[in-house]
Amino acid sequence: MAEKSMLLLGATGGTGAQILEQALAAGHRVTVLARTPAKITTQHPNLRVVQGDMLEAARLTAAFDQPYDAVISALGVYLKNPGTTMTDGTKNIIAAMTAKGIKRLIVVSSVGASETKGIGPLWVRAVQHFILKNTLIDKTMQEQAIKDAGLDWTFIRPPRLMNGPKVGRYVTWTEAKPPKHLKLKWQVNRGDVAAEVLRSLDDPTTVGQAVQISDPA
């Protein structure tokens, strides 16, 4: 994988931390935007931490003081009530990217967003409808805002996230529903999601694609 320069948002979360670890191990140069920089305890010569918040446009823009090959968002906000937190923050990210001429954006989204609404076995659909309803509505609007912006986007959509390392046994598909031959656990390790995010950096076929990911059954 060729060395990249990237801006990473959400590095203090479980999936973002895995992306950061794997990106640095692969030799990439990473700038992290964090509301609380002290939460980033990793020390590495290729790591820069900038204090900021996606919901505060001026502070977000401060992180765009250098060119990046890609912006990666592993941000996640659980919404118990209706809201547009992810959509609003993403619009700020889009504006900053557009101003700097940065095109490549990879976003960790979720199964249940956009055209994947209602897929999966009963328990997965129940989680989508009763627990993640407002979160998934926001993620769907977030995805649409990115599509409308004309960026070179990729969405990585996991189902249930497990706090595990990269294993490498996961499967992916780009149709709304998984192919019938795939037998799925409907869960995946955060480390494997991170691996797919970074793999997508060097895979032009993922541009303009939503990639669903799960461990096989």
Image: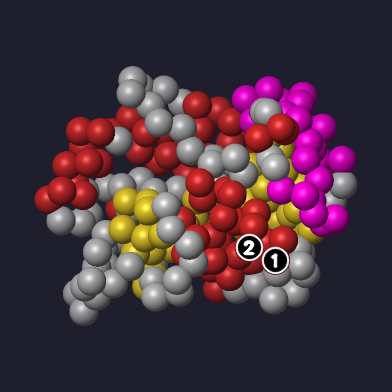
Residue 144: where, in percent of width, then height? 47, 43
Q: In which quarter of the image is residue 183?
A: bottom left
User: For the point 68% across and 28% down, which residue is it?
Assistant: 36
Asked if the residue at tag 2 contacts the one at tag 1, i.e. Cβ–Cβ closer than 8 Å, the answer is yes
Q: Which of 8 and 42 is in front in this view?
A: 42
Q: What element carries label 2?
A: helix
- Does residue 4 appear to the left or right of 178 in the view shown? right
Q: Distance between the residues labelled 1 and 2?
A: 5 Å
Does 63 lie within the magenta span? yes
Judge the density around disc 1: few (<14), some (14-19), many (≥20) Cα neighbours within 10 Å.
few
* Circle number at residue 122: none
Residue 176: where, in percent of width, then height? 31, 61
Can residue 102 be seen at all in this image of the molecule? Answer: no
Q: Which of 111 and 141 is in front in this view?
A: 111
- Does residue 86 appear to the left or right of 12 in the view shown? left
Q: Is mark 1 on a helix, strand or loop?
A: helix
Q: Give the range drawn in magenta.
A: 42-65
- Disc 1 designates what residue? 25
Residue 42: where, in percent of width, then height? 71, 48
Give the amino acid at mark 2. Answer: Gln
User: For the point 65% across and 54% down, which residue is it?
Assistant: 20
User: For the point 70% across and 66% down, which residue is it?
Assistant: 25
5 relative to 95, above or below: below
- Disc 2 designates what residue? 22
Give the amino acid at mark 1. Answer: Ala
Q: Which of 125 and 44 is in front in this view?
A: 44
Residue sitting at the far left = 122
User: For the point 15% across and 56% down, which residue is it?
Assistant: 121
Can residue 108 be seen at all in this image of the molecule? Answer: yes
